Image (cartoon, coloured by chain):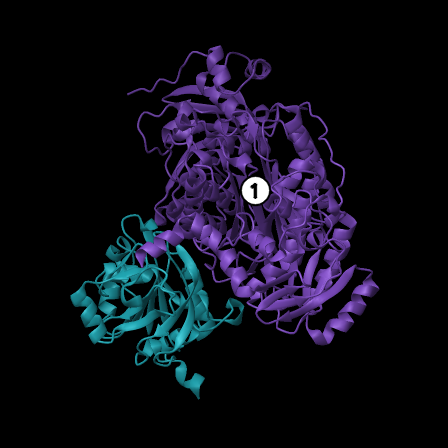
Amino acid sequence: MTVNNTHPITSELISSHGINDEEYARILELTGREPTFTELGIWSAMWNEHCSYKSSKKWLKTLPTEGHRVVYGPGENAGVVDIGDDDVVVFKMESHNHPSFIEPYQGAATGVGGILRDVFTMGARPIAAMNALRFGDPGHAKTRHLVAGVVSGVGGYGNSFGVPTVGGEVNFHPRYNGNILVNAFAAGLAKRDAIYISKAEGVGLPVVYLGAKTGRDGVGGATMASAEFDDSIDEKRPTVQVGDPFTEKCLLEACLELMASGAVIAIQDMGAAGLTCSAVEMGARGDLGIRLNLDDVPVREENMTAYEMMLSESQERMLMVLRPEMEDQAKAIFTKWDLDFAIVGLTTDDLRFSIHHQGEEVANLPIKQLGDEAPEYDRPWVEPGTHSQQEPHLFAPPHDYNTALLKLIGSPDLCSRRWVWEQYDTLIQGNTMQLPGGDAGVVRVDGHPSKALAFSSDVTPRYVEADPFEGGKQAVAECYRNLIATGAEPLAATDNLNFGNPEKPEIMGQLVASIRGIGEACQALGMPIVSGNVSLYNETNGEAILPTPTIGGVGLIDEHERMTRIGSMQAGDAVFLIGTEGTHLARSIYQREILGEETGPAPLVDLLMEKARGEFVLAAIRADYASAVHDISDGGLAVALAEMCMAADLGMKCLIDVTYPHSALFGEDQARYIMTINSEWAGMFAANSEGAGVSFAQIGQVAEERLIINDLIDISVGDLKTVHESWFPDYMGETALAEAAE
Amino acid sequence: MPRTTIVQFPGSNRDRDMIAAIAKISGISPTLAWHTDTSLPDSDLIIIPGGFSHGDYLRSGAIAARAPVMKAIAAAAGGVRILGVCNGFQTLTEAGLLPGALMRNARLTFVCKEVKLQVANATNAFTAGYRDGEVIRCPVAHHDGNYFADQKTLKSIEDNNQVAFRYAEGTNPNGSINDIAGIFNEQGNVLGMMPHPENLIEPAHGGQDGRRLFEGALNMLETESA
């Protein structure tokens, strides 16, 4: 049976592809005639926001992307950073927001699958994953279902594939009620000279299709990811892909074997817009045309049209340009792993993207223009408004400090995430040195006696909402601090920018200002952005999410024997605050949970101070002074101390100078850490801090059983833990389930 | 020198952990066998590692249990020591080389955490490095670790001292009957267990409680205790 590939091009069809009049005029000009139905699909896939970054490109170009360790920055499947000894770390973060809201398990699972492929396409074996998840109000009818689905989807894919999930974030806010965020991070290790990029080289070489078969799943997915939601979202379920981690694991092993054999010239995974995007990228980067014959594409459904095959987002597929003399060897590897291996096309010298199906040419488009000449918009934007700083006395103190601290550490955003991360395999590969729950996940570098890598994912959306510029800076600064706190030198970062509709000037203003903030912070803190992803149109019925530019940072620990943890202190150690007394309560967790408000300015980030204190803390860890380190962030000093006590199962007795007790305990001022130091060295450490000009205060001692702060706080660590550990299982109904079972 | 063979299936994913553990403990890299192999090299210990063989798409270990290599493993089970960890344990029960079955965890979710194990029978080579009743640390990471056997089978397992490890101190993570975490076959040369001793064998793992299991299985204990 012959499949019909023609379809009249009407204005409704054009607009349903997310193409506006101006863009269509440009398409007519570049095509030289009315596009065919298949061609319209290809243009739409390449020019949508998700693939083309047309609203953000102008601003993304301003980010610092270079550094002496950067091997490949943005533009490849993932960023590549040198970690010495010819080793490189390859990493990226990417969103899968829209699919996860529609079908949480598969949406999250394929988000994890996609980011893992981005990493191993470059020849790196994935060694760590993280997931930054943002859900709506816990009281919202859909939230529990979405949490359960997303967490099991993340675990279901990553656990089976075999990558340890070592970190991430889980937060709740009503502004995500209609549009959750699933940002998946993956990092891999490779040798510097064994990295593969997508640029094809050589004319007349076979283009090979690898992996799973093509079905109709995900047709138009990239276009969906670039549209707002309304109440008809359930109709979009068929555009969500289905993940198969088993095939992905086989694909990983087959690809790494294939790369080691020397058969690969260029390779690209099929992610968003599948075959279209991967083929165009390989050709356009290498200044080559690509000719594909769709009759040779392995399919798992009958009667697929050219349009469907070109736009399918079936998972676990790759496209490769092969050294022709190695075809037999390459094929044998894929046969061993029971995966499809099909020559589906050729590289050409005519710079055309030519698609054949059933003996007919169904598309013939200029490949460079598809890839590089996507529209680029300088969308109108307005400078976000600012708030004046607010003194602590403007905020009411709590009735009781013990009750307030317990409420904070038992709140949805600060409680233990154990319920989540115990569903992830955190230990597989046998290299995990720090689990989720500390400042950063740590994985040692396999085969090296002392190196390890630290990973952290951070952003505080309520700060970004208040002040996109300072909020953007803060996301980078907190990530930097979390890496430092383990004893890692921050190396580089990936950014995952989640915003609303960029056609609204206020939203565009948030994007512009936060990119500016991220750029300044990355420059100042020496963390270039080496990869990233932009997710726009995160709106439902016209309401945007909180602006959420997630930063995924990677740091290098040169001697993991000196690594510090959040709870690695001993009773008797001296407790030091690095930084000054807390003063900032606006947009704090205290303000939200105790006062029931979310107003005012974000805390200011002094980047020079961040850098100076960060370098001081890192030097102290490397000199083996510190027994434990933790950064002070959400919830302020009291929450940071409580978190250390719970992790160590030890108490602390602290006496701090306070001007305003509530801001001293709960203020969220930046650039601050807690360090514990063996008491014998405390004097010398204090002298060093003084000499280095770093603000510090010796505030107490590690003790047994109770956290005591002045006459304000006196709680047993057991009570802290009970409250901290119970919110998540209670919320998910687990406690009730366990009681019923007994 | 002890010779170890590790059997790999498509979807095995703790094979690399196991290879590293054996190389570190025994000083020699294990030989690898593929699921389609029909014979195995002479070995002192054969290991089926953890993972999601064939995606665990039918039942955990069910497809792996019917792989060509399992005939060779069944033949070796007449005398050679065989260790199945996690997916390996599931595969050995599916293949009928160990009694009982591993069902979905009682809480229905994947669980990865550290648990406590009580050594229930230290008279076997696998457990000879531990004291009877000793409680050790060990991580688990599985979705289908809820051990079950019918009453008659269970009674015979218990009567024959075939329980190797039990979850201790209230840490049963999956609802296993009688807190069973690992069992021997009747002869005592085949051990299946859900926990992952290979992930706790060196200081960088935060502990070494898993190490003695491999030293016992590889007859390396004399030098240790001397």
Q: Which residue is at the front of the view, A6 or A293?
A: A6
Residue A639 higher or lower than B24, as above or below: above
Total numbered badges shown on the rendered structure: 1
Return the chain for callout 1.
A
Depth check, front residue: B93 or B18: B93
Q: In which quadrant of the rendered view does residue B106 lie?
A: bottom left
Quadrant location, the N terminus of chain B: bottom left
From this viewpoint, is residue B143 visible? no
Residue A166 in the image: above or below residue A105:
below
Q: Residue furthest bottom?
A: B226
Q: Is residue A271 above or below residue A154?
A: above
Amino acid type of the residue tagged 1 in the rendering: Ile
Residue at the spot of label 1: A197
Q: Position of residue A386 (x, y in %)?
A: 74, 34
Is any atom of residue A195 visible in this view? yes
The colour of chain A is purple
Q: Colour of chain B?
A: cyan
Q: Nearer the viewer, residue A213 or A569?
A: A569
Q: Where is residue B206 drawn, in percent x and y?
A: 51, 69
SS under mark 1 = loop
Residue at the spot 45% in from the left edge and 70% down from the top edge: B23
Q: Note whether A695 is above or below A55 in the view shown.
A: below
**Whole-percent x, y for residue A489 in the image:** 68, 57
Give the farthest residue toward the left: B152
Q: Residues within 10 Å of mark 1 (few under 14, many from 20)?
A: many
Question: Quadrant where the C terminus of chain B lies?
Answer: bottom left
* Horizontal side, residue B63 vs residue A655: left or right: left
